[in-house]
Amino acid sequence: GEGSNLSLRGGSDAVENAKSQLKEVMERSNNLEQKVDDLAEGYENLAQSFGMGGFKVTRTASYSCLNEEALTQPAPAVIETADEDEPAPEPSDTVVQIPAAPPSEALSQKIAAALAKDSKVVEEEAFVLPPEERMNIVIVSSEVAPFSKSGGLADVCDKLGVSLSRMGHRVMTVAPLYWRYDGCENTGSVKEFGITGQKHRVEYWRKWRETAPASAETGGEAFGVNHVFVQNGCYERHGMYGHNDDLMRFTVLSWAALEAPFSVDCNGSVFGDDCIFLVNDWMVGLVPLIMVSHYRRYGCYMNARTIFDIHNMGYCGNFGVCDPQDLGLPNGDFFDKLFHDRQIKLLKGGIELSDRVVTVSPSYRDEILTPEGGWGLQESCRSRFPHLDGVLNGIDESEWDPQTDHYLSAKFQGFDNFYR
């Protein structure tokens, strides 16, 4: 209306100058996009000239190289195994109806092959700890490869367990039983937890995975990993995450993980309460809280320690504020450690109540201390700075080999192919 005219400092000249700068930025952006397209086309032509099939981007159903549906859900009756020389199939938008059938033989063979390749004879120069330095280590995660996987979290929990066991440590992994994996047996151990006003009954299943046969270097005993799975109907669904009762599902997993060392017989004995818990990401962020507020109250796990591993600060496990009793905490001790921004965040509880906090690399440790990388929890991370560290993740070089990875549309065969 009248009297409401706004003037820009500098007048019309400033306006024209701003328009000119904006036009220049847009032209540079368009030129950059064209250069990227030209570069991609050049690589495509180069690859085709060597008969390599091109550099076309190939994606799977999940953001990892393993298909989450195939590993966590019943597979179709027939699965044709693709030849290693063929590229991975293009993703389809068609909704796949998963039949109520056990995993196919091909999928079971795939998992068995992944487990078998980790059983290797311990060489003389390998680092094997003396018996008095070996520990009981419990790795708690919502996914463990090759049984279930949506990303790098499953890989870390898988290969870390293998490496620790080959050093002589007694290792257990605890994860949900998303499906009946081949060779996995019911231990007969049952526990019941009062969560969200209901009784949730879980059964423990177990699979022994040998990582080093008995030899002189191992002291005459075989090394391996005890894969323990928590069975409850809430896990046997399509997909591992994104359900409206995820708080209940992962609260059950956290309680079950803390009971597993007492309840599951592993080659003749249980682990007991003298353990190191490696707790991974927000899904099991309640493990340190439950240990501190419940078990240690009754003199249990007094010598145990928890190490909380942050893989991705962007996923904090945000839920609406609930009653402590809904999480199985009748006294509500330390429940306030979960509060942030008018909600509870399971990741925050893991950070503040664990004995040590680690990230997947030293640089990521520095990143989560900043407002940009802390996702609102940078102050919690800074408060744990004396007990915060970063350990660089490793990879399985046989699995992540570009010369044999059939998920790549073009095989890497050495730099000589480009300089003939």
Image: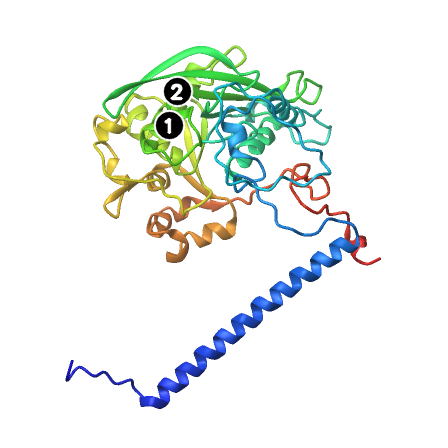
Q: Residue at x 54, y 29 (%)?
A: 70
Among the 4 quarters of the image, the one containing residue 30: bottom right
- Determine which of the numbered discs, if any, sits on residue 232 in the image: 2
The answer, for residue 302, to whether it is visible in the render is no
> How busy is the neighbourhood of tag 2: few (under 14 within 10 Å), some, or many (20 plus)?
some
Front residue of this view, candidates 236 and 101: 101
Distance from disc 2 to disc 1, alpha carbons, whole Å, reads 13 Å
Task: Work out whether mark 2 precedes mark 1 in sequence or the reverse, and give the earlier one.
Answer: 2
Residue 362: where, in percent of width, then height? 51, 50
Pointer 1 residue: 254
**Residue 394, placed above or below residue 306:** below
Among the 4 quarters of the image, the one containing residue 195: top left
Residue 253: where, in percent of width, then height? 38, 26
Type of amino acid at the residue the image marks with label 1: Ser
**Residue 386, placed above or below residue 253:** below
Front residue of this view, candidates 333 and 403: 403
Name the residue furthest left: 2
Residue 36: where, in percent of width, then height? 61, 64
Left or right: residue 303 versus residue 182 is left
Residue 174: where, in percent of width, then height? 46, 25
**Residue 414, placed above or below residue 206:** below
Q: Residue at x 84, y 57 (%)?
A: 420
